[in-house]
Image (cartoon, helix red, strand yellow):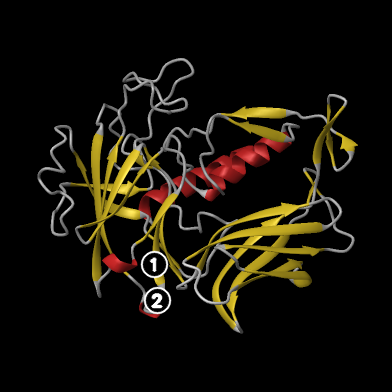
Amino acid sequence: MTRIICLCILCAVVLVAQEQPRPEYPQPQFQREQWLNLNGRWEFEFDDANAGIQEAWASADRKFSRTILVPFAFETKLSGIGDTSFHPYVWYRRTFTVPADWKDKRVLLHFGAVDYRAGVWVNGRTAGEHEGGSVPFSFDITPLLKTGANSLVVRAEDQPTDRYQPRGKQYWEPKSRSIFYTRSSGIWQTVWLEGVGQSYLERVTISPERNGTVRFDARIARGQGELELHASVRSGGQAVATGSGRVRGGVAIAGTAVADPRLWSPGSPTLYDVTLELRQGTAVVDRVTSYFGFRSVEVERGRVTLNGGRTYLKMVLDQGFWPESVLTPPSDEAIQYDIRLTKEMGFNGARKHQKVEDPR
Protein backbone atom coordinates (compact mmCIF):
# COMPACT_ATOMS: atom_id res chain seq x y z
CA MET A 1 0.00 0.00 0.00
CA THR A 2 2.82 2.40 0.91
CA ARG A 3 4.49 1.80 -2.46
CA ILE A 4 1.24 2.59 -4.25
CA ILE A 5 0.83 5.83 -2.32
CA CYS A 6 4.43 6.84 -3.03
CA LEU A 7 3.90 6.15 -6.72
CA CYS A 8 0.80 8.36 -6.67
CA ILE A 9 2.79 11.15 -5.06
CA LEU A 10 5.47 10.83 -7.72
CA CYS A 11 2.82 11.08 -10.43
CA ALA A 12 1.38 14.15 -8.72
CA VAL A 13 4.82 15.78 -8.67
CA VAL A 14 5.27 15.15 -12.41
CA LEU A 15 1.84 16.67 -13.12
CA VAL A 16 2.72 19.72 -11.03
CA ALA A 17 5.62 20.46 -13.33
CA GLN A 18 3.41 20.22 -16.43
CA GLU A 19 0.19 21.98 -15.38
CA GLN A 20 -0.84 24.83 -13.10
CA PRO A 21 0.59 23.83 -9.69
CA ARG A 22 -1.49 23.95 -6.53
CA PRO A 23 -4.81 24.63 -8.36
CA GLU A 24 -7.00 24.21 -5.25
CA TYR A 25 -8.34 27.16 -3.27
CA PRO A 26 -5.52 28.07 -0.85
CA GLN A 27 -7.55 29.01 2.26
CA PRO A 28 -10.43 26.54 2.74
CA GLN A 29 -11.40 28.10 6.07
CA PHE A 30 -12.20 31.40 4.31
CA GLN A 31 -13.26 30.47 0.80
CA ARG A 32 -14.94 32.58 -1.88
CA GLU A 33 -16.60 31.46 -5.10
CA GLN A 34 -15.15 34.18 -7.32
CA TRP A 35 -11.40 33.74 -7.48
CA LEU A 36 -8.58 33.41 -10.02
CA ASN A 37 -5.45 31.35 -9.39
CA LEU A 38 -2.25 33.11 -10.55
CA ASN A 39 0.09 30.16 -10.02
CA GLY A 40 2.01 28.94 -13.05
CA ARG A 41 4.71 30.34 -15.31
CA TRP A 42 5.94 33.83 -14.44
CA GLU A 43 8.82 35.82 -15.88
CA PHE A 44 11.73 35.95 -13.43
CA GLU A 45 15.03 37.76 -12.89
CA PHE A 46 17.86 37.71 -10.38
CA ASP A 47 18.90 41.22 -9.28
CA ASP A 48 22.22 40.56 -7.56
CA ALA A 49 23.34 44.16 -8.11
CA ASN A 50 20.11 45.48 -6.55
CA ALA A 51 19.60 47.72 -9.58
CA GLY A 52 15.96 46.91 -10.29
CA ILE A 53 14.38 49.82 -8.44
CA GLN A 54 16.70 52.42 -10.00
CA GLU A 55 16.27 50.90 -13.48
CA ALA A 56 12.45 50.80 -13.16
CA TRP A 57 12.03 47.04 -13.50
CA ALA A 58 8.50 47.45 -12.16
CA SER A 59 7.36 49.22 -15.33
CA ALA A 60 4.50 47.51 -17.13
CA ASP A 61 6.48 46.81 -20.32
CA ARG A 62 9.68 45.46 -18.74
CA LYS A 63 10.59 41.88 -19.77
CA PHE A 64 12.61 39.41 -17.69
CA SER A 65 14.99 36.81 -19.12
CA ARG A 66 13.98 33.71 -17.11
CA THR A 67 10.79 31.88 -16.22
CA ILE A 68 9.80 30.32 -12.90
CA LEU A 69 6.96 28.06 -11.83
CA VAL A 70 5.09 29.87 -9.03
CA PRO A 71 4.55 29.11 -6.14
CA PHE A 72 7.87 27.26 -5.89
CA ALA A 73 10.94 29.17 -4.65
CA PHE A 74 13.82 29.56 -7.10
CA GLU A 75 16.00 27.29 -4.92
CA THR A 76 13.69 24.32 -5.58
CA LYS A 77 13.69 21.78 -8.39
CA LEU A 78 9.99 22.25 -9.10
CA SER A 79 10.49 25.96 -9.77
CA GLY A 80 12.36 25.04 -12.93
CA ILE A 81 15.45 26.93 -11.71
CA GLY A 82 16.89 25.01 -8.75
CA ASP A 83 19.61 27.54 -7.92
CA THR A 84 20.53 27.27 -4.20
CA SER A 85 23.21 29.97 -4.25
CA PHE A 86 22.63 33.37 -2.66
CA HIS A 87 20.39 35.84 -4.52
CA PRO A 88 19.06 38.46 -2.07
CA TYR A 89 16.91 40.32 -4.63
CA VAL A 90 14.62 38.70 -7.18
CA TRP A 91 11.82 39.94 -9.46
CA TYR A 92 8.70 38.30 -10.87
CA ARG A 93 6.33 39.41 -13.62
CA ARG A 94 3.15 38.12 -15.26
CA THR A 95 -0.05 39.47 -16.80
CA PHE A 96 -3.65 38.68 -15.93
CA THR A 97 -7.12 39.62 -17.11
CA VAL A 98 -9.92 40.23 -14.64
CA PRO A 99 -12.99 38.07 -15.43
CA ALA A 100 -15.74 40.04 -17.20
CA ASP A 101 -18.36 39.18 -14.56
CA TRP A 102 -16.28 40.99 -11.91
CA LYS A 103 -16.96 44.42 -13.42
CA ASP A 104 -18.97 45.61 -10.39
CA LYS A 105 -16.62 43.96 -7.88
CA ARG A 106 -13.61 45.13 -5.97
CA VAL A 107 -10.55 43.02 -6.72
CA LEU A 108 -8.22 41.73 -3.99
CA LEU A 109 -4.72 40.45 -4.76
CA HIS A 110 -3.63 37.77 -2.26
CA PHE A 111 -0.21 36.26 -1.49
CA GLY A 112 -0.04 33.15 0.69
CA ALA A 113 3.57 33.97 1.61
CA VAL A 114 6.61 35.79 0.19
CA ASP A 115 9.94 35.42 1.98
CA TYR A 116 10.92 37.93 3.29
CA ARG A 117 10.09 41.46 2.04
CA ALA A 118 7.84 42.09 -0.92
CA GLY A 119 7.07 45.06 -3.13
CA VAL A 120 4.12 44.76 -5.52
CA TRP A 121 3.20 46.81 -8.60
CA VAL A 122 0.15 46.59 -10.87
CA ASN A 123 0.43 48.25 -14.28
CA GLY A 124 3.57 50.00 -13.10
CA ARG A 125 1.86 51.56 -10.06
CA THR A 126 2.58 50.60 -6.45
CA ALA A 127 0.04 48.22 -4.91
CA GLY A 128 1.82 47.88 -1.58
CA GLU A 129 4.68 46.42 0.43
CA HIS A 130 4.89 43.67 3.03
CA GLU A 131 7.44 42.29 5.48
CA GLY A 132 7.29 38.80 6.97
CA GLY A 133 8.09 35.56 5.20
CA SER A 134 5.52 33.15 6.62
CA VAL A 135 2.24 35.06 6.76
CA PRO A 136 -0.38 35.93 4.11
CA PHE A 137 -1.11 39.45 2.91
CA SER A 138 -3.34 41.16 0.38
CA PHE A 139 -3.99 44.44 -1.42
CA ASP A 140 -7.13 46.00 -2.87
CA ILE A 141 -5.92 46.67 -6.42
CA THR A 142 -9.23 47.90 -7.86
CA PRO A 143 -7.99 51.47 -8.59
CA LEU A 144 -4.93 50.14 -10.43
CA LEU A 145 -6.73 47.90 -12.92
CA LYS A 146 -7.52 48.49 -16.58
CA THR A 147 -9.58 46.67 -19.20
CA GLY A 148 -7.77 43.73 -20.79
CA ALA A 149 -4.30 42.53 -19.78
CA ASN A 150 -2.85 43.87 -16.52
CA SER A 151 0.82 43.72 -15.52
CA LEU A 152 1.76 42.32 -12.09
CA VAL A 153 5.35 42.71 -10.83
CA VAL A 154 6.75 41.48 -7.51
CA ARG A 155 10.15 42.29 -6.03
CA ALA A 156 11.27 40.02 -3.19
CA GLU A 157 14.16 40.63 -0.82
CA ASP A 158 15.49 37.80 1.34
CA GLN A 159 18.90 38.41 2.93
CA PRO A 160 20.24 34.85 3.28
CA THR A 161 22.99 35.63 5.81
CA ASP A 162 20.97 37.89 8.12
CA ARG A 163 20.62 35.87 11.33
CA TYR A 164 18.30 38.47 12.86
CA GLN A 165 15.71 37.95 10.13
CA PRO A 166 13.11 35.35 11.19
CA ARG A 167 13.80 32.31 9.02
CA GLY A 168 12.89 29.14 10.88
CA LYS A 169 15.17 26.30 9.76
CA GLN A 170 16.34 28.04 6.56
CA TYR A 171 20.13 27.98 6.68
CA TRP A 172 22.30 31.10 6.38
CA GLU A 173 25.14 29.05 4.86
CA PRO A 174 25.23 27.96 1.19
CA LYS A 175 24.64 24.23 1.82
CA SER A 176 22.17 22.46 4.13
CA ARG A 177 23.73 20.95 7.24
CA SER A 178 22.60 19.24 10.42
CA ILE A 179 19.14 20.62 11.36
CA PHE A 180 19.24 23.59 8.94
CA TYR A 181 17.80 23.35 5.45
CA THR A 182 17.62 24.95 2.02
CA ARG A 183 16.06 28.42 1.85
CA SER A 184 12.69 29.33 0.27
CA SER A 185 13.26 32.85 -1.01
CA GLY A 186 10.57 34.94 -2.67
CA ILE A 187 7.10 33.66 -3.54
CA TRP A 188 6.53 30.25 -1.97
CA GLN A 189 2.75 30.02 -1.55
CA THR A 190 -0.20 30.52 -3.88
CA VAL A 191 -0.96 33.91 -5.48
CA TRP A 192 -4.59 34.61 -6.34
CA LEU A 193 -7.27 37.21 -7.06
CA GLU A 194 -10.73 37.49 -5.52
CA GLY A 195 -13.78 39.44 -6.63
CA VAL A 196 -15.63 40.89 -3.61
CA GLY A 197 -18.44 43.34 -2.92
CA GLN A 198 -18.00 47.06 -2.32
CA SER A 199 -18.21 46.12 1.36
CA TYR A 200 -16.71 42.72 2.17
CA LEU A 201 -15.74 40.29 4.91
CA GLU A 202 -12.09 40.79 5.76
CA ARG A 203 -11.72 38.21 8.53
CA VAL A 204 -13.93 35.94 10.63
CA THR A 205 -12.97 34.23 13.89
CA ILE A 206 -15.04 31.13 14.72
CA SER A 207 -15.34 30.15 18.41
CA PRO A 208 -17.24 26.85 18.97
CA GLU A 209 -17.94 25.38 22.39
CA ARG A 210 -18.50 21.77 23.39
CA ASN A 211 -22.11 22.48 24.37
CA GLY A 212 -23.01 23.35 20.75
CA THR A 213 -22.85 27.13 20.91
CA VAL A 214 -20.73 28.92 18.32
CA ARG A 215 -19.80 32.57 17.86
CA PHE A 216 -18.67 34.31 14.67
CA ASP A 217 -16.64 37.53 15.07
CA ALA A 218 -16.28 39.31 11.71
CA ARG A 219 -14.26 42.28 10.57
CA ILE A 220 -15.76 44.14 7.62
CA ALA A 221 -13.80 46.27 5.16
CA ARG A 222 -15.34 49.40 3.60
CA GLY A 223 -18.55 48.98 5.59
CA GLN A 224 -21.17 51.19 3.96
CA GLY A 225 -24.87 51.50 4.81
CA GLU A 226 -26.91 49.14 6.99
CA LEU A 227 -25.14 45.78 6.94
CA GLU A 228 -25.77 42.48 8.70
CA LEU A 229 -23.71 39.33 9.17
CA HIS A 230 -25.69 36.13 8.61
CA ALA A 231 -24.34 32.66 9.49
CA SER A 232 -25.86 29.36 8.34
CA VAL A 233 -24.44 26.16 9.86
CA ARG A 234 -24.85 22.85 7.97
CA SER A 235 -24.21 19.19 8.68
CA GLY A 236 -24.33 16.67 5.87
CA GLY A 237 -25.71 19.36 3.58
CA GLN A 238 -28.65 20.12 5.89
CA ALA A 239 -29.07 23.44 7.73
CA VAL A 240 -28.91 22.89 11.51
CA ALA A 241 -28.61 26.46 12.88
CA THR A 242 -28.57 30.12 11.86
CA GLY A 243 -27.57 33.36 13.51
CA SER A 244 -27.11 37.02 12.62
CA GLY A 245 -25.75 40.30 13.93
CA ARG A 246 -25.60 43.92 12.82
CA VAL A 247 -22.38 45.54 11.61
CA ARG A 248 -21.25 48.38 13.85
CA GLY A 249 -17.94 50.17 13.50
CA GLY A 250 -16.66 47.67 10.96
CA VAL A 251 -17.27 44.60 13.14
CA ALA A 252 -20.16 42.18 13.64
CA ILE A 253 -20.90 39.30 15.99
CA ALA A 254 -23.31 36.48 15.19
CA GLY A 255 -24.04 33.57 17.49
CA THR A 256 -26.11 30.41 17.32
CA ALA A 257 -26.38 26.91 18.82
CA VAL A 258 -26.53 23.40 17.37
CA ALA A 259 -28.69 20.90 19.26
CA ASP A 260 -26.95 17.65 20.28
CA PRO A 261 -23.65 18.50 18.57
CA ARG A 262 -21.35 15.73 17.41
CA LEU A 263 -17.96 16.43 18.92
CA TRP A 264 -14.65 16.53 17.07
CA SER A 265 -11.81 14.16 18.02
CA PRO A 266 -8.88 12.60 16.14
CA GLY A 267 -10.78 9.32 15.93
CA SER A 268 -14.04 10.97 14.83
CA PRO A 269 -13.16 14.32 13.21
CA THR A 270 -16.72 15.65 12.73
CA LEU A 271 -16.81 19.04 11.04
CA TYR A 272 -19.67 21.45 10.44
CA ASP A 273 -19.85 23.68 7.37
CA VAL A 274 -20.84 27.33 7.64
CA THR A 275 -21.80 29.96 5.07
CA LEU A 276 -21.17 33.54 6.19
CA GLU A 277 -22.96 36.28 4.28
CA LEU A 278 -22.69 40.05 4.50
CA ARG A 279 -26.16 41.35 3.70
CA GLN A 280 -27.62 44.75 2.92
CA GLY A 281 -31.36 44.32 3.20
CA THR A 282 -32.20 41.27 1.07
CA ALA A 283 -29.06 41.65 -1.09
CA VAL A 284 -25.98 39.50 -0.42
CA VAL A 285 -22.98 41.84 -0.62
CA ASP A 286 -20.28 39.23 0.12
CA ARG A 287 -20.17 35.52 0.94
CA VAL A 288 -17.52 33.13 2.28
CA THR A 289 -17.65 29.50 3.39
CA SER A 290 -15.76 27.83 6.21
CA TYR A 291 -15.94 24.92 8.65
CA PHE A 292 -15.34 24.13 12.31
CA GLY A 293 -15.59 21.39 14.92
CA PHE A 294 -17.13 21.34 18.38
CA ARG A 295 -14.57 20.33 21.01
CA SER A 296 -12.89 21.46 24.21
CA VAL A 297 -9.19 21.25 25.03
CA GLU A 298 -8.23 21.90 28.64
CA VAL A 299 -5.55 21.13 31.21
CA GLU A 300 -6.79 19.62 34.47
CA ARG A 301 -4.36 18.74 37.27
CA GLY A 302 -1.47 18.80 34.84
CA ARG A 303 -3.15 16.52 32.29
CA VAL A 304 -4.60 17.38 28.89
CA THR A 305 -8.28 16.66 28.37
CA LEU A 306 -10.21 16.53 25.10
CA ASN A 307 -13.99 16.94 25.32
CA GLY A 308 -13.78 16.38 29.07
CA GLY A 309 -11.87 13.09 28.83
CA ARG A 310 -8.21 12.53 29.59
CA THR A 311 -6.11 12.13 26.47
CA TYR A 312 -2.45 11.40 25.76
CA LEU A 313 -0.70 13.40 23.07
CA LYS A 314 1.40 11.20 20.79
CA MET A 315 2.86 13.69 18.33
CA VAL A 316 5.49 13.93 15.64
CA LEU A 317 7.75 16.93 15.02
CA ASP A 318 6.83 18.02 11.49
CA GLN A 319 9.59 20.11 9.93
CA GLY A 320 7.47 20.61 6.80
CA PHE A 321 10.10 20.30 4.06
CA TRP A 322 9.89 18.40 0.76
CA PRO A 323 12.98 17.31 -1.23
CA GLU A 324 11.76 18.73 -4.56
CA SER A 325 9.96 21.85 -3.31
CA VAL A 326 11.42 22.66 0.15
CA LEU A 327 8.79 24.63 2.17
CA THR A 328 6.05 24.46 -0.46
CA PRO A 329 4.04 21.21 -0.53
CA PRO A 330 4.21 19.92 -4.12
CA SER A 331 0.52 18.98 -4.09
CA ASP A 332 -2.52 18.44 -1.89
CA GLU A 333 -1.79 14.71 -2.12
CA ALA A 334 1.64 15.24 -0.56
CA ILE A 335 0.07 16.90 2.50
CA GLN A 336 -2.51 14.13 2.85
CA TYR A 337 0.15 11.44 2.53
CA ASP A 338 2.08 12.84 5.51
CA ILE A 339 -1.09 12.96 7.63
CA ARG A 340 -2.13 9.42 6.71
CA LEU A 341 1.34 8.04 7.39
CA THR A 342 1.46 9.81 10.78
CA LYS A 343 -1.87 8.28 11.81
CA GLU A 344 -0.91 4.81 10.50
CA MET A 345 2.14 4.88 12.78
CA GLY A 346 -0.11 5.48 15.80
CA PHE A 347 0.36 9.21 16.36
CA ASN A 348 -2.57 11.56 16.98
CA GLY A 349 -1.04 14.96 16.27
CA ALA A 350 1.86 16.98 14.95
CA ARG A 351 3.95 19.82 16.27
CA LYS A 352 4.24 22.30 13.40
CA HIS A 353 7.79 23.51 13.72
CA GLN A 354 8.30 27.31 13.74
CA LYS A 355 5.88 27.95 10.85
CA VAL A 356 2.85 26.54 9.07
CA GLU A 357 3.96 25.69 5.55
CA ASP A 358 0.46 25.53 4.10
CA PRO A 359 -2.97 26.66 5.41
CA ARG A 360 -4.65 23.63 3.82
Mark sitting on residue 95: none
Residue 120 in view, yes or no: yes
Tag 1 near tag 2, CB within 8 Å: yes
In which quadrant will I find the N terminus? top right
Q: Amino acid at mark 1?
A: Val
Where is mark 2, residue-wise?
102
Q: Helix or strand or loop: what does disc 1 sit on?
A: strand
Residue at point 31%, 33% (across, down): 158
Mark sitting on residue 107: 1
- In depth, the one of 67 and 49 nearer the eye is 49
Q: Sequence-wise, which precedes: disc 1 or disc 2?
A: 2
Drawn side of residue 146 relative to residue 36, left or right: left
Q: CA distance from mark 1 to mark 2?
A: 8 Å
Q: Position of residue 216 (x, y in %)?
A: 68, 59
Q: Position of residue 156 (x, y in %)?
A: 29, 41
Residue 111 in view, yes or no: no
Q: Position of residue 198 (x, y in %)?
A: 45, 73
Seen from this angle, which residue lies furthest front?
Answer: 249
Residue at point 75%, 63% (across, down): 255
Seen from this angle, which residue lies furthest bottom?
Answer: 282
**Circle 1 Cα neighbour tier, 10 Å, few/some/many (<14 / 14–19 / ≥20):** many
Q: Quadrant of residue 335?
A: top right
Residue at point 36%, 74% (across, down): 99
**Circle 2 Cα neighbour tier, 10 Å, few/some/many (<14 / 14–19 / ≥20):** some
Q: Quadrant of residue 88?
A: top left
Q: Amino acid at mark 2?
A: Trp
Drawn side of residue 129 relative to residue 57, left or right: right
